[in-house]
Image (cartoon, rainbow, N blue to C red):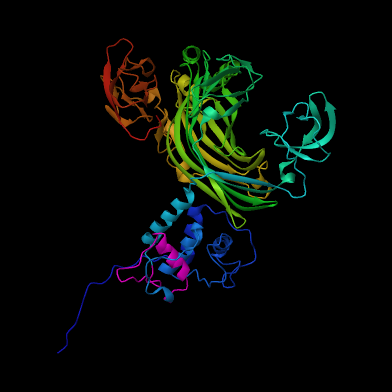
Amino acid sequence: MSIVLGGCRPDPVDEILLGEWVSEIIEKAGIFPSEESVPYYLNIPSGSVWFETVQTAADWKILDPGDPFDPMQPLTREWAAYTLINLSGMEKKTSDRTIRDLAASRFPEHISSAVSFGLMDPDQHNRFRPREVMDRSDARHLLDQVITYINTRTFEHHDAQIIMDEDIHLLEEEPLAYDPESSSVLFPAGTQVKSGDVISTGDQEHPFVIAESTQEQENGTSVMVKDADPEDVIDRIDAIGSFDADFSRAEITDLLDGTQSVPETSCTDHYFHLMASRQYSRTHVINGFTVSYTVNTSGIRAEVTRTAPGGLTVFADASLTGVHPVYQWNSSRGNVEYGYFRVDCTTNESFSAGRDAFASGQANLKDIDAARFLESLKEAFARGRDTAALDVPLCSFRIPVPEVPLLNITGTVSLKLDAEGRAKLSLSQQHSLGMEIRNGKMRAIHHSDSQSKAALYGSADFMTAVSFSLNAASLSLTDAVIEAGINAEITSTVHSYDRQGNHTALQTSLPADMVADHAGGTEGILVCSDADAVWILDLILNSSRTLAGRYGFSRQMSLLKPEQANVFPGRRIHMENFHIVERCTRTERERPPAYSQLPESDQIMIAEYVLIGKAGESRSIDITSLPADCPRSALSFVSQDSSIAQVNQNGQVLLKQSGSTIITVSSADGRYRVRCTVHVRYEDGNAH
C-alpha cells in the first residue's frame, strides 16, 4: 500500500535576469551610457548585448568589477539589496535586527543596510533568504522606492564654504566702496595694497578683483582693479541646501529694454528689487505684439497678445511658479567630487490663434472655376499674407539663497511662437528636473506630470524656455533649461473636379484653415489635410558657461517617449473638414454619367434615397433617370441644413457635422422633385 502526499504548489515566480535588472536600474535612474571601451568584466566583452549596460553600471558603482557578475542569472534577494544600496548612495550601516543567515550571503553589508533603511525585511524567523529568486514585480517595487529617494532628496540645513587658493594673497581689509564702471575700489587712507592682491568686493557680479595700481586721495586709498576669474582664485567649494524661491526677493533684469515700452509703474531702473508686498509688471510692444510680464512672490507670468483685423489674432500666456531648488556641491580645482542640482517647479502654457472667416475672400472665389481655385487663392494670399512670429527673451532673475550670501539661483524666461493658422492649445506641467554627478559620471533627474490639449487647424510652433543656474558668487556651477511646447505642421491637398468629373489633386503650403474656408464656397473643390504634431519637453543640462559643463557634464535630451510626444494617435493623421479619418475619401468621388446616357422616366430617380456617413466624408447623389423635359444641367440641389451636409450642383455631398438633414433635387421649374435624407454619425476622436 502506498500513500501519495500532496500539497499546495507555490505560485510561480516571474524571474528577471540580472542583466535585465541592471538595465532597468540604469533607465529609471537616468544614467547616461558609459564611454569606457575597456571591459570591466572579462566574461562580458565589447561584443556582448550586455556590454554597455554593465559598463554603465560599473561606472556608477552599482556593480563592482571585483564581484563576479553573470547577467544571465536570475535576480536574487541578495543581488537586489546589493544593487539598490549601491544605487542609493547611502552609507552602509549595520542593522539592529538579528539576521540569522547573513553570513550565507556574499553581500552581508548591503543586506544589513537594506534592512536597516527599511527597504527589505527578513522573515518571521529572522532569515533574509539571500539566494531566493525575486519576483519581477516585487523587485520593481523596491526599485521605484529607491528612485523616488534619489530623485526627491532634500536638505534641511543650508551651508556653503568657499576656500581660496593658498597661493593668492586675499586682503583682509574690507573696502569702503567698489565701482565696477570705473574698475576702482576705495579703502581707508593708508591701507597697504600691492599689485596682484585679490580683493573681495561683496558684489555679486564681480566678487573678486585683482589690484593693479594704487593712488592716495583725500577720501582714502583708491585702487584700480581688474576682474579675477573665480576659477583662478577659488580652490574648493562646498555647498548644501534647499529652499522655496521667493521672487519678491529676486533681482529682475528686463531683457526687452530698448523696444517700444509702456511701463506700468514709475520704476525706470534697468535692475529693480521687489518688496515682499509689491508686484512688478512690465509691458512692451514688439512687431505688433503686446508683450507683458508680471513678477510677484510666487513667480513670473508672461502674456502676449496680437490683434490684426483680417489676419491672425494671437493670445499666449506662460507662467513659472512653485520654484524649489535642491542642491549639494563638492568640488576642488579641476574636479567635481559630487554634484546634485534639482529644481521642482510648475509651468503653465496656453496659446490660441484665430482669424476672420474670410468672408471677402469667399465672395471673390465662390464662383471661380475649380481649375483656377488654387492659383487664385495663392494670389490673394500673396497680397495679404499674414503669419504671427515672435521669439523673445523676457527677463532674467537672481534669487539669493537664504542664510547663505555666497550662493544664488539665477535664470531666464523666454518665449517663442510662430503660427500660420487657427490653433488652440494648453499645457500644464509639474516638473522635478536636474542632475546628479557621482564617480565622475552624470545622470539626469526628470519627472513631469503633465496635462495637455490641442486643437489645430494650421501649422503652429509654440515654446517657452526656463533656465535655472546654481552660482557661487559669480561662478556658475551647474544649470538646467526646460523647454516645453508644441510643433505642428499641417499641409493641405486641394482636390478639384471639372464638370465631367475629372479629378486633379495639388498639394499646397498655404495655411490649411484658409484653404478649407475658401473651398467651402467653391463648387468642385474638396480639401483634405495631413497633420504631424508633437509635444516638446526637452531638458538641457550644464551649458558651457558652467563649471560642470566645462568639465564635460553637458547633455541635451527629450523627456518624452514617442508615444507620449504624439499630439494625435500615431503622430501623423489625415483629416477631412478637420475631422480625423482613416483614409482619404476625396479621391473616391465617382465620375457622373454623361447626361445623354440617362434613361427617361416620369420623375427624377436617384440611386440612393438615404446617405449615411461620418463627418468629413463625401457622398454623391447619383441621378439614374430623368423626365424627357428635365435636362440634367438644369437640376438644382439644395440642402435643408448646410451646417450638417453641404451639396454642390454636381450632387457631391460633404458631410460636415453630426445630425440629419434633407437634400432636395428639383427641376428648374419645380415640376419634378425628389428628396434624399442624409444622416451624419457622431464620432469620437475628432481633431476639435
Q: Residue at x 58, y 70 (%)?
A: 41
Residue 388 lies in quadrant? top right
Residue 10, given in percent of the width and then of the height, sits at: 28, 70
User: In the visual, does 606 lie left or right of 170?
Assistant: left
Q: Which residue reaches farthest bottom?
A: 1
Q: Quadrant of the N terminus?
A: bottom left
Residue projecting furthest to the front: 190
Q: Is residue 665 left or right of residue 195?
A: left
Query: Does residue 166 lie above or below 254 as drawn?
Result: below
Above or below: residue 55 compared with residue 525: below
Q: Nearer the viewer, residue 403 or 193?
A: 193
Examine the image and state in which quarter residue 381 appears. Answer: top right
Q: What residue is at 77 percent from the left and 44 percent from the top?
A: 169
Q: Is residue 123 magenta?
A: yes
Q: Magenta: predominant secondary structure element? A: loop
Residue 141 percent location from the top left of the image: 38, 57
Q: Is residue 633 visible?
A: yes
Residue 621 pos. (x, y %): 34, 25
Is 199 left, or right, of 320 in this rendering? right
Foreground residue among 156 and 630? 156
Q: How many marks?
A: 0
In magenta, the rendered stretch is 104-133
Do we see residue 509 in this rendering?
no
Farthest-out residue, top = 669
The answer to whether residue 635 is magenta is no
319 versus 126 height, above or below: above
Q: Nearer the viewer, residue 19 or 147?
A: 147
Residue 163: % across, % down: 68, 47
Q: Residue furthest left?
A: 1
Quadrant in the picture for the C terminus: top left
